[in-house]
Amino acid sequence: MSADKSVKLGIIGAMDVEVELLKESMEVTSTLERSVTTFYEGTLSGCEVVVAKCGIGKVNAAACAQSMIDLFGVTHLVNTGVAGSLAEELGIGDILVSEDVVHHDVDVTALGFEPCRLPDFPKVNFVADADMCTKLVQACEAVAPQATCVRGRVASGDQFVSGAEQRSSIRSALGAGCAEMEGAAIAQVATLNEVPFVILRAISDHADGSAVDDYPAFERSSAQIAARVMQEFARLMAE
Ligand code: ADE
């Protein structure tokens, strides 16, 4: 990929636990503070990267993604972290690579728009970059062979999903494989700026009643699986 266009990969995680391993593994050449965010610029596995913790939720994620584009000129965006599983086949420690992503909490149905669709966009979903998806799956297979890795749909909302009813309504309405709180915002900003994106999520809980216990128990181990995959992904992006 870098033969015709040099890659500068923006890597966004919502929480310290999702980016700390990446920061430790990269060669940092500069840091920049903006608002409450510190951006770490340098190389990871030979790939030019900018890494930042955006904070939890879609507004934080969108602000961070736009800053990565405006301040650093990132050519590609990736969102890494943990998520609640909505799918039978995804257990704790397994991985979902986004084919697309939807805001599960958007509702302009009163004005005739379909559920989850923002009026300014033609469809409910934001489609991830196919080449980045392929490389992420390759990275999963290389460094997390113990994990089931599926391509699928991510559902994002400003809600921690922890109820069986909420879980099954997101699953049945959207066919999403996991729920998290940032991906669709990053995807929307990427789409508006014509920057290719992908989302990587390692499962920390089942987004049902057990999530309040499982999430704190598995947040760190699942975040580290995602971070290790991200290191390999950066290497593949630099090839
Ligand atoms: N991130 C990790 N688990 C989650 C859940 N159950 N809902 C939303 N975001 C999450």
Image (cartoon, rainbow, N blue to C red):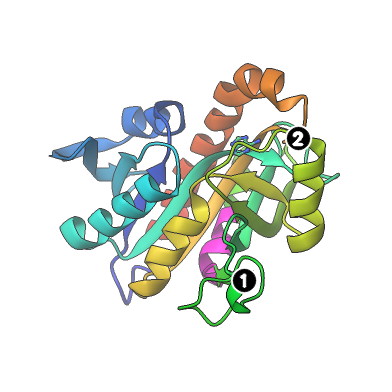
Q: Which residue lies furthest to the front in this view?
A: 110
Q: Categorize mark 1 by other alpha carbons within 10 Å: few (<14), some (14-19), many (20+).
A: few
Instruction: Give the residue displayed 33% in from the left and 72% down from the top.
Output: 193
| Residue 144 visible in the current orientation | no
The range drawn in magenta is 128-136
Q: Relative to residue 160, is residue 62 drawn left or right? A: left
Q: Where on the image, by quarter, is ligand 1? A: top right
Q: Residue 126 location, x and y as percent?
A: 54, 69
Which residue in the protein does label 1 denote? Answer: 110
| Residue 43 visible in the current orientation | yes
Q: Earlier in the sequence, mark 2 or mark 1?
A: 1
Q: Name the amino acid, label 2.
A: Gly
Which residue in the protein does label 2 denote? Answer: 163
Q: Tell me the element at label 2.
A: loop
Q: Residue 59 location, x and y as percent?
A: 38, 49
Mark closer to the observer (2, 1): 1
Q: Relative to residue 69, is residue 62 drawn left or right? A: right
Instruction: Give the residue displayed 25% in from the left and 61% down from the top.
Output: 69
Residue 167 covered by magenta stretch: no
User: In which quadrant will I find the N terminus?
Assistant: bottom left
Q: Is mark 1 within 8 Å of ligand 1?
A: no
